[in-house]
Image (cartoon, grey):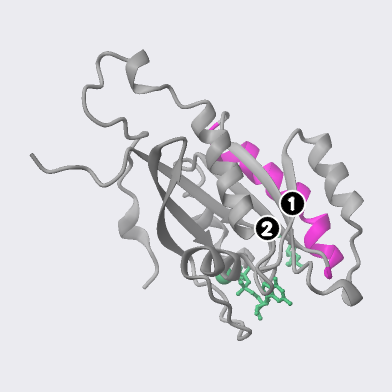
Amino acid sequence: MAKKTYDLLFKLLLIGDSGVGKTCILFRFSDDAFNTTFISTIGIDFKIKTVELQGKKIKLQIWDTAGQERFHTITTSYYRGAMGIMLVYDITQPKTFDNITKWLRNIDEHANEDVERMLLGNKCDMEDKRMIPKERGESIAREHGIKFLETSAKSNVNVEKAFMTLAEDILRKTPQKDSNPDSSSVSVHKETSSRKSGCC
Ligand SMILES: Nc1nc2c(ncn2[C@@H]2O[C@H](COP(=O)(O)OP(=O)(O)OP(=O)(O)O)[C@@H](O)[C@H]2O)c(=O)[nH]1
Ligand SMILES: *[C@@H]1O[C@H](CO)[C@@H](O)[C@H](O)[C@H]1NC(C)=O
Ligand SMILES: [Mg+2]
């Protein structure tokens, strides 16, 4: 019998204003690389990375959305399938931090109620250009009861930790196999088939 290469599938989503570094964070996590050229995401894209947590192989399917307003309709259509959402702002661009409340509202409107959320203040390598103190990120995260990290895709700070933490939080509330006698083989989370509407 063919063996599954993973035990669980987690669908994650990256959201936030254009230019905050969503694609770079994902590229750092998936390929351990960084590119300074800004190629704004068109619509939606995804990458896959399998990680191991508590002895379980977890396939992370990570959707990278375009931050530009003109893609709002297509990107929000992906919220529903997400089990975890990373909200990203740029610590050097106050507008992107102000807009976090807007992105949180989008989650309320379009995502599942039990979705795990996490806030990232990206580009923390640019200390000289910092406009948003770390405390402001911590404070808004606390207000909304979500976790917070400052990251740098460029210097590889907290990127792996962010995804692993989000995955752990999802795993914690995932019913385990033995507690559900009906699922004999592999417990795959609510599979939806929405891959076809990708961009390229
Ligand atoms: N210094 C620094 N620059 C970064 C970092 N992350 C991303 N950048 C730069 O910021 C720009 C935008 O990064 P992207 O990852 O393409 O931004 P995005 O959020 O995906 O933007 P959209 O796809 O338009 O929504 C690029 O020029 C990156 O090189 C970081 O951690 N530090
Ligand atoms: C913040 O959100 C508004 C409304 O969607 C958008 O027009 C604006 O461009 C966003 N700000 C940044 C810095 O992207
Ligand atoms: Mg992008």
Place of residue 135 in the rendered image (x, y in percent of width and height, measured from the top left): 91, 50
| Residue type at tag 2 | Asn
Q: Main secondary structure of the magenta part?
A: helix
**Looking at the image, residue 198 lies above or below residue 173:** below
Q: CA distance from mark 2 to mark 1?
A: 7 Å
Residues shaded magenta = 92-112
Percent from the top left, x then y, of residue 41?
A: 53, 72
Residue on which disc 2 sits: 158
Query: Among all residues in the image, which is located at the extreme left?
Result: 1
Query: Which residue lies under the disc numbered 1?
Result: 149
In this view, the residue in front, 140 or 176, is: 176
Q: Which amino acid lies under the numbered mark 1 shown in the image of this protein?
A: Leu
Looking at the image, which residue sits at the far front?
55
Q: Residues within 10 Å of mark 2 (few under 14, many from 20)?
A: some
Residue 173 coordinates in the image, percent (x, y): 52, 25
Secondary structure of the residue carrying numbered label 2 = loop
Contact flag, marks 2 and 1 (Cβ < 8 Å): yes
Name the residue located 82 percent from the left edge and 74 percent from the top edge.
126
Give the quadrant of ligand 2.
bottom right
Could you tell me which quadrant the C terminus lies in? bottom left
Residue under the image location 50 percent in, 48 percent down: 12
| Magenta highlight on residue 103 | yes
Side (left or right) of 107 relative to 186: right
Vertical arrangement, residue 116 with respect to residue 74, above or below: above
User: Position of 25 compared to 124: left or right?
Assistant: left
Residue 27 placement, left or right of 154: left
Residue 122 picture quarter = bottom right
